[in-house]
């Protein structure tokens, strides 16, 4: 009997030695394959790029697989720090990477329940797993996890480990780290979290998707109470604090679940394209840039509200399905609001920056500016009579004739230049273009900021060449800024994740028009609002504007400005189908008016500078327009093609 017992004990001992040898061998092999812990010294986690509005609000976070913003431990709520330690690793400040008592307790509890109900991994082990290992549950991985945890504890302080862990932990809905999670769930920073909010997020660590309050509020509430009880058990909060937190009604921020915010999606996508062009996708999506933009969220909200209202209420009546608006401070070039279409989530095509449309008569101010530069003043009389233009393929080959008409089909005889601009008359404008020279008008448009191709033909007077809303609005800003051009901008500065300034936008002013020329043009365009085609856009302050309609009523424009703000409005259809012709004078001016009445409320009333050294009669003269029955006149013009009519 004793012999049998000795033999059995021998087998047990040998078996134990074999197991120990196997474990030792496995541990040694794992130890030789462990990653270099010193890499933590230079570890830079993937971090989201954040866009801020000019009024300090977060517009968007750009990221791919990980939405993360790293913050120091000092900027993480102490409630959250305690909640995580109490729930995940109560002995965090006592152990050296492994909590053997916790491992034994977890093993006993799991055996009693017949399933895994509690883990024995410390915060340091979880950090080791998150940073260096896969999530596959194998014996080898657990050994590696323990060995790495021991090494981390030898090299880093508890505060450094906790900071790394809280910035690394996955907390649901693609949010990594507490700063992103605080913003996602509560629209707050990590420092602003109270006890109830901290307990709610800390409870997510064991099952971020399972306990998401957006998917399973009941489960997340139970986890929150569980965390609060853990804090009470360890004396980290008072009973009164625990009761208040348990019954507190937390306010979630589900809008943060959108990858692009509900406000300014067209502007955000425009900025994103600029950033990726400049820095590349890797830095933009992982580099943690801080991008400060020009957008004013209150102005943007007004723009989106107004555009949505008019498209939904008047789109069917006037047969248009799209609208766009951009608003710029002409003194700085800062884009304050941008709406690139009726609905970003249905069509991401940006009609402010990407579309090229015929501007119709909104192009005429460039021609009239060229005339003013040549000493042709607003009181100059121009003929408004039926005219046939000879169209030429080149100087030797005629291609036919062109008989443009006015918007209403009427002719008014001799009219002043001012009257022709106010009423957007076509024949006088074409005659004026012929007089000042096509190239001179093109040069003016280029100086003011039009970059799109301009056909060198008399049809330029009718806005036949396609341009973008952004460049037209920016060009009109030159008038508002007394002849000084400032390039449009969407970004004011960019900082690295460490706060190093990478880019600071310079406001570069360039005089492109004499201030007197600009002042005379402003005075003429004031008449468009007071008694011309833009009367429905009148607001209670000095303003100037120009309307425009393209050929067959495919586009309607209104670009207007006050000294501190220039705003361009467009309505139409993406398929170029025609609208009902009254959209130009009925809808666009009222969109512009509705928007400006909101955004200018409370802002000082400013007036434009007056021309200096000119007699008032030189530029204020307005000759009444007689309406005789004119005779038909034939004029030949090389290079003319059929353009838009208004």
Image (tube, rainbow, N blue to C red):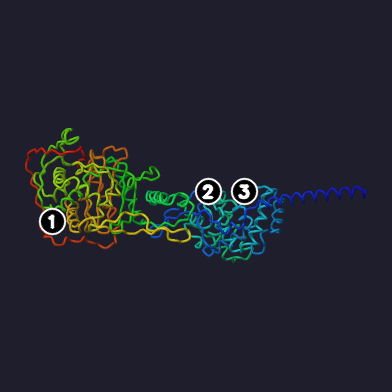
Q: Earlier in the sequence, mark 1 or mark 2?
A: 2
What kind of element bears circle 1? helix
487 vs 610, left or right, is right
- Say which mark, if any, is on residue 345: none
What kind of element bears circle 3? loop
Q: Is residue 230 above or below residue 283?
A: below
**Distance CA(mark 1)–CA(mark 2):** 68 Å
**Distance CA(mark 3)–CA(mark 1):** 78 Å
Mark 1 in CB contact with mark 2 (< 8 angstroms): no
272 vs 626, left or right, is right
Residue nearest the observer in this picture, 133 or 6: 133
Residue 257 position, x and y percent, is 47, 50
What kind of element bears circle 2? loop
Residue 602 position, x and y percent, is 29, 62
Residue pointed to by mark 3: 135
Mark 3 in CB contact with mark 1 (< 8 angstroms): no
The quadrant in which the C terminus is found is top left
Please name the residue shown 67% across and 47% down the image: 138
Residue 575 position, x and y percent, is 31, 37
For label 2, the crowd category at 10 Å Cα-Cα, with few meaning under 14, some 14 to 19 and many 20 or more, is few
142 vs 429, left or right, is right
Q: Earlier in the sequence, mark 3 or mark 1?
A: 3
452 vs 616, left or right, is right
Residue lying farthest to the front in this orientation = 396
- Say which mark, if any, is on residue 215: 2
For label 3, the crowd category at 10 Å Cα-Cα, with few meaning under 14, some 14 to 19 and many 20 or more, is few
Residue pointed to by mark 1: 619
For label 1, the crowd category at 10 Å Cα-Cα, with few meaning under 14, some 14 to 19 and many 20 or more, is many
Q: Earlier in the sequence, mark 2 or mark 3?
A: 3
Residue nearest the observer in this picture, 113 or 267: 267
Q: Nearer the viewer, mark 2 or mark 3?
A: 3
């Amino acid at each position: 009997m004793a012999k049998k017992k000795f033999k059995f004990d021998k087998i047990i001992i040998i078996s134990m030695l074999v197991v120990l040898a196997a474990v030792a061998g496995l541990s040694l092999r794992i130890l030789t394959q462990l990653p270099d812990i010193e890499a933590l010294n230079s570890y830079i986690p993937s971090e989201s790029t954040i866009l801020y509005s000019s009024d300090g609000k977060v517009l968007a976070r750009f990221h791919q697989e990980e939405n993360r913003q790293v913050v120091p431990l000092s900027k993480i709520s102490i409630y959250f720090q305690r909640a995580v330690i109490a729930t995940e690793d109560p002995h965090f400040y006592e152990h050296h990477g492994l909590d053997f008592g916790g491992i034994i307790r977890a093993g006993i509890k799991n055996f009693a329940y017949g399933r895994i109900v509690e883990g024995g991994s410390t915060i340091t082990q979880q950090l080791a797993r998150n940073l260096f290992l896969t999530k596959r549950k194998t014996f080898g991985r657990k050994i590696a996890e323990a060995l790495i945890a021991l090494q981390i504890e030898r090299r880093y302080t508890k505060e450094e480990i906790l900071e790394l862990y809280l910035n690394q932990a996955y907390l649901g809905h693609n949010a990594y780290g507490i700063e992103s999670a605080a913003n996602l769930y509560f629209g707050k920073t990590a420092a602003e979290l109270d006890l109830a909010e901290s307990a709610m997020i800390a409870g997510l660590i064991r099952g971020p998707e399972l306990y998401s309050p957006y998917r399973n509020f009941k489960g997340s509430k139970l986890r929150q109470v569980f965390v609060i009880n853990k804090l009470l058990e360890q004396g980290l909060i008072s009973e009164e604090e625990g009761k208040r937190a348990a019954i507190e009604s937390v306010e979630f921020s589900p809008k943060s679940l959108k990858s692009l915010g509900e406000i300014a999606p067209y502007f955000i996508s425009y900025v994103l394209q600029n950033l990726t062009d400049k820095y590349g996708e890797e830095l933009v999506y992982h580099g943690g840039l801080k991008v400060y933009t020009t957008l004013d969220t209150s102005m943007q909200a007004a723009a989106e509200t107004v555009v949505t209202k008019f498209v939904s209420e008047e789109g069917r009546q006037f047969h248009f399905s799209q609208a766009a608006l951009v608003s710029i401070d002409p003194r700085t070039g800062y884009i304050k609001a941008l709406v690139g279409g009726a609905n970003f989530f249905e069509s991401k095509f940006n009609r402010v920056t990407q579309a090229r449309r015929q501007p119709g008569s909104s192009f005429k101010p460039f021609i009239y500016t060229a005339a003013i530069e040549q000493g042709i003043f607003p009181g100059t009389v121009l003929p408004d009579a039926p005219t046939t233009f000879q169209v030429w393929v080149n100087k030797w080959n005629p291609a036919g004739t062109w008989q443009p008409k006015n918007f209403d089909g009427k002719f008014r005889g001799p009219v002043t230049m001012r009257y022709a601009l106010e009423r957007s008359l076509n024949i006088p404008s074409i005659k004026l273009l012929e007089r000042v020279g096509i190239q001179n008008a093109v040069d003016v448009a280029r100086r003011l900021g039009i970059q799109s191709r301009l056909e060198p033909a008399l049809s330029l007077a009718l806005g036949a060449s396609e341009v973008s809303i952004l460049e037209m609005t920016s060009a009109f800003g030159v008038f508002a800024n007394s002849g000084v051009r400032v390039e449009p901008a969407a970004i004011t500065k960019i900082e690295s994740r460490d706060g190093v300034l990478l880019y600071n936008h310079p406001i570069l002013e360039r005089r492109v028009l004499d201030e007197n020329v600009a002042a005379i043009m402003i005075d003429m365009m004031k008449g468009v609002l007071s008694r011309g085609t833009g009367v429905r856009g009148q607001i209670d302050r000095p303003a100037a504007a120009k309307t425009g309609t393209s050929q067959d009523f495919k586009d309607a424009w209104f670009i207007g400005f006050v000294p501190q703000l220039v705003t361009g409005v467009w309505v139409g259809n993406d398929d170029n189908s025609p609208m009902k012709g009254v959209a130009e004078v009925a809808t666009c001016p009222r969109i512009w008016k509705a928007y400006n009445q909101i955004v200018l409320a409370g802002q000082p009333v400013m007036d434009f500078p007056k021309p200096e050294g000119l007699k008032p009669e030189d530029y204020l003269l307005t000759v009444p327009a007689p309406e005789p029955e004119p005779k038909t006149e034939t004029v030949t013009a090389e290079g003319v093609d059929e353009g838009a009519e208004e």
